[in-house]
Image: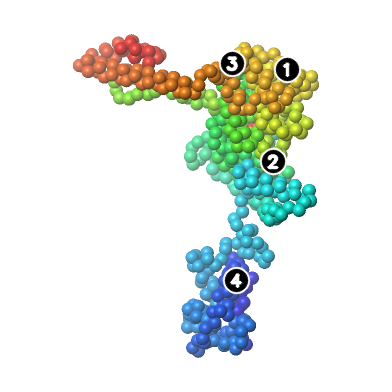
Amino acid sequence: MSSKLRMAPEVCVHVEPPNDLDSSSGCELSFELSSDNLRSPSPTPRLRYTLNTPGPNPSYSPPYKKVRALRLFDSPLTPKTIIEKSAATPALRSRLFTDKPRTAGTSQRSEKPTANVNPFTPNGMYQTKKRLRSTSSLQVPHFDLNESDASDVENEPPAKRVPLHENNIPRYHQEFLELELIGSGQFGSVYKCINRLDGCIYAIKKSTKPVAGSVFEKTALNEVYAHAVLGKHQHVVRYYSAWAEDNHMIIQNEYCNGGSLADRLQEGPLSSVELRQMLMHVAEGLRYIHSEALVHLDIKPGNIFISKEKKMQFTNYDSADDGFEDLDESHYEEELTYKIGDLGHVTSLNNPQVEEGDCRYLPNEILHEDYSHLTKADVFALGLTVIECAGAGPLPKNGDDWHKLRRGELPEMPTALSRDMVNLIASMIHPNPAMRPAALQILHHPALCPVGKKTRAQLHRELNAEKLKNEILSKQLKEAAICIKTIAPESKQMKGVSRISNRLIGKNFNRSVSATTF
Ligand SMILES: Nc1ncnc2c1ncn2[C@@H]1O[C@H](COP(=O)(O)OP(=O)(O)OP(=O)(O)O)[C@@H](O)[C@H]1O
Ligand SMILES: [Mg+2]
């Protein structure tokens, strides 16, 4: 593309912009040289210029003050070199030129840097809604004065704007050290990796097949979109990043060191306490997902992950050398957190694109394409997950037993469960989805909230009282330690006292109990 200054009558100069110069520069230039800006002739021009203006008496002199200001005529610079120079001046360049060449007829919008629109973000959902509204208004012809809205939508660029195959980045081996394969499923294989830079462990999921440009690209992106939106909850596997490499989709997630719930079930059913905890955690995760107007649609033990963490069970106090070294050893206990993962089937409640999950956990209504109670499909799948964890697995894929479960009939469950728990599970697999509890109702059910009759305020009061008691006991313990130190004058004697105190308090003795002995 070139901007053209007409020179009359003898010379015609083409101003060739640099390769990355777009037509906007031409626009500016031609504006600058408009007839409005014509000024008086300049002294002895080397070249005689004229503007291609409709006005009378075209001048054979430099056309206007700003061009003279460029010192075109008393410097060896040609218009071409001026533009080349200006291209090298960032401030001016950024004003004049955009980074990408603009082709004729390309709209302003296409020059924006491209990025996908995540359909699960509020903005993405809004755009989908608009698109749906416009489609439905096209299907039912009517005189809608709100046309501008629909035409806006037609002009909307597509949500997926970054072709994966054009965005391959070789990050995997550069950034991560592969430790081991930790699992594989329908979509891909998951590797335990250590990030070379931050030294932390991650679960990296790689699609088995190249997805870029294939029908699986949408599914792969769906998982990334869902992870990106649902990345901030204790009971949802955390997402860090995703990219395409060798046309495969790669997702970097939080590593759950306890494996999947399905792996855990290989060791036998959960106890009633474990079952209660698992149900509470997954229901919390579901409540969060549903509150974001999304549904998981593939809840099952293989997609619930366990994170094991050593947690200190006792408040630590000042660890100065007080002769109570045994007591300073923190008492750790392993704490399990269940997290919902594998978000490949997530869809939005506003515009459900249902991809049926595992048939063992699928409720009847989804098979009949009734999507009016999608959140309850997750509740149903969680109900069956609980049944499996209580020892009634493996669940049937079809046949009479499959139908029995869909009729709401509970199988034999080896784990001893309270009546409340049995009632809760039965309600979760109710044949009528409307009758199943919502995730929040599960959390408030007496089976999970045995203190359900106590109000929040009451629970807070009790908690504060316990904290206060704990604080007083810790203080007493500390004072006792100081007291022992001051009583024992010599280190030899001190050793004796320490021995006595060790004997008195004991390594495995509960600190709060030992404090009461003073
Ligand atoms: N974040 C993680 N931490 C630990 N292990 C994981 C993690 N993610 C996946 N895994 C392991 O990899 C297996 C497969 O993972 P995932 O379910 O995400 O893959 P998939 O291909 O989508 O499976 P599906 O067959 O359910 O579609 C899991 O069952 C689990 O054993
Ligand atoms: Mg899975």
Residue position for label 2: 351
Note whether 484 is above or below 53 in the view shown: above
Kind of element beneath mark 2: loop
Crowding at dot 1, Cα within 10 Å, few <14 / some 14-19 / many 20+, comes out as some
Which circle's residue, 3 or 4, is located before the other in the chain?
4
The disc, 4 or 2, on the residue closer to the chain's N-terminal end is: 4
Q: Could you tell me how far apart the alpha carbons at marks 1 and 2 are, in whole angstroms?
A: 32 Å
Q: Earlier in the sequence, mark 4 or mark 1?
A: 4
Residue 27: image tag: 4
Instruction: Indicate which disc, 3 or 2, sits on the residue closer to the N terminus.
Output: 3
Residue 263, image quadrant: top right
Query: What is the three-letter code of the residue carrying label 1?
Result: Glu
Residue at mark 3 to residue at mark 2: CA–CA distance = 38 Å
Task: Write the residue at 54% across / 43% down.
Answer: 175
The residue carrying mark 3 is: 272
In this rendered view, identify the residue nearer to me: 188 or 72.
72
Q: In 3D space, how far apart are the residues under numbered discs 3 and 4 (Cα atoms)?
A: 75 Å
Frontmost of labels 1 and 3 is 1
Real-space Cα separation, disc 4 to disc 2, in angstroms:
43 Å
Q: Callout 4, which amino acid? A: Cys
CA neighbours of label 3 inside 10 A, class few (<14), some (14 to 19), many (20+): some
Foreground mark, 3 or 2, reads 2
Observer-nearest residue: 188 or 400?
400
Residue 198 seen from this side = yes
Is there a contact, CB below 8 Å, between mark 4 and mark 2? no
Residue 105 % position (x, y): 68, 65
Q: Determine whether label 3 and label 2 are within 8 Å by CB.
A: no
| Residue at 62% across, 64% down | 101
